[in-house]
Image (cartoon, rainbow, N blue to C red):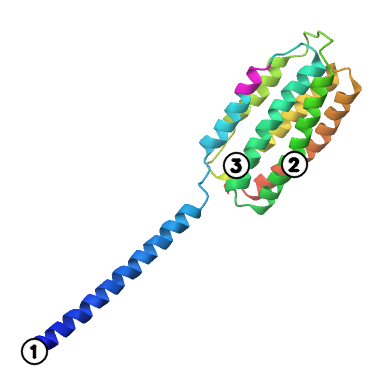
Amino acid sequence: MFNHLTKSLTMKNTIKITFLAAVISVSAACKKETKVQTAAPVDSQQMKAAMTATSDRMKTIQFTKDPDVDFALILKTQQQGVIDIANLELTSGSDNYLKDKAKEIITKNAELIKQLAAYIAANPAQANDLKFDVMLLLNKVGAITEADLNGKVDHDFATLMLGLHQAGVDISKLELAYGHRDAILQMANKIIVEHQAEVQELKAWLIANKNK
């Protein structure tokens, strides 16, 4: 009878251990599944890589020395970089305001890129203005990669986007100073107004969300 009782207790303990192991196994599997479904974090290096890629693409542009055409070529390439960084925010950012801003930027800039591509296709270079400083424009964008990033997606997105928008304003002002064709001059004026407004919005967000 004693042996029977011992076997019974052993069997009960075995069942408990087996059940506990199963619970632990299921719990671990759930944690693993949750980890897989979580978006991979984006750090400053990825943001900088996107900026560097944009700067590198700009250096391969075949410039014409026609301010209107070169402005369109530079802006088209820059705006693709803006979309790339906005996509990083949309994928891994956490601030709802900035994620909505990223969606807005992606939609607006995709349309702008189409307009610039159409302009470039329909307007072959004519002028030859050596005063239109292409290197100055390239340096403005390249310098943004040295921005004060802290490894947090929302902060880095706002910081880089602020720099890109300001560069867009500066580039557009150069176009107004040296350009000739009405269609692209109107586009430059519109960009200045829109980008200056967004620069102020992003500055306000950074001040209100310091180190976030």
The part of the image, by quadrant, that contains residue 105 is top right
Left or right? Give the position of 73 relative to 14: right
Left or right? Give the position of 71 relative to 43: right
Q: Report how far apart the C-alphas of labels 2 and 3 lie in the structure.
A: 15 Å
Mark 2 or 3, which is nearer the eye?
A: 2
Amino acid carrying mark 3 in the image = Leu
Element class at badge 1:
helix
Whichever of labels 1 and 3 marks the residue nearer the N terminus, that label is: 1
Is residue 124 found inside the magenta-colored segment of the image?
Answer: no
Provide the residue designation for mark 3.
88
Query: What residue sits 89% from the left and 19% below the top?
Result: 181
Q: Report how far apart the C-alphas of labels 2 and 1 lie in the structure.
A: 78 Å
Query: What residue sits 60% from the left and 52% below the top?
Result: 94
Is residue 59 found inside the magenta-colored segment of the image?
Answer: yes
Amino acid carrying mark 2 in the image = Thr
Amino acid carrying mark 1 in the image = Phe
The count of marks equals 3
Q: Where residue 164 appears, x then y in whole percent?
A: 69, 32
Q: Where residue 79 appears, x then y in whole percent?
A: 71, 31
Element class at badge 3:
helix
Per the rendering, the mark at residue 107 is 2
Provide the residue designation for mark 1.
2
Query: What residue sits 79% from the left and 18% below the top?
Result: 69
Left or right? Give the position of 208 relative to 119: left
Q: Which of 148 and 181 is in front in this view?
A: 181
Q: Where residue 107 appears, x then y in whole percent?
A: 74, 41
Whichever of labels 2 and 3 marks the residue nearer the N terminus, that label is: 3
Q: What stretch is highlighted in magenta?
A: 56-61
Disc 1 to disc 3: CB gap under 8 Å: no
Query: What residue sits 70% from the left and 18% below the top?
Result: 136
Element class at badge 2:
helix
Whichever of labels 2 and 1 marks the residue nearer the N terminus, that label is: 1
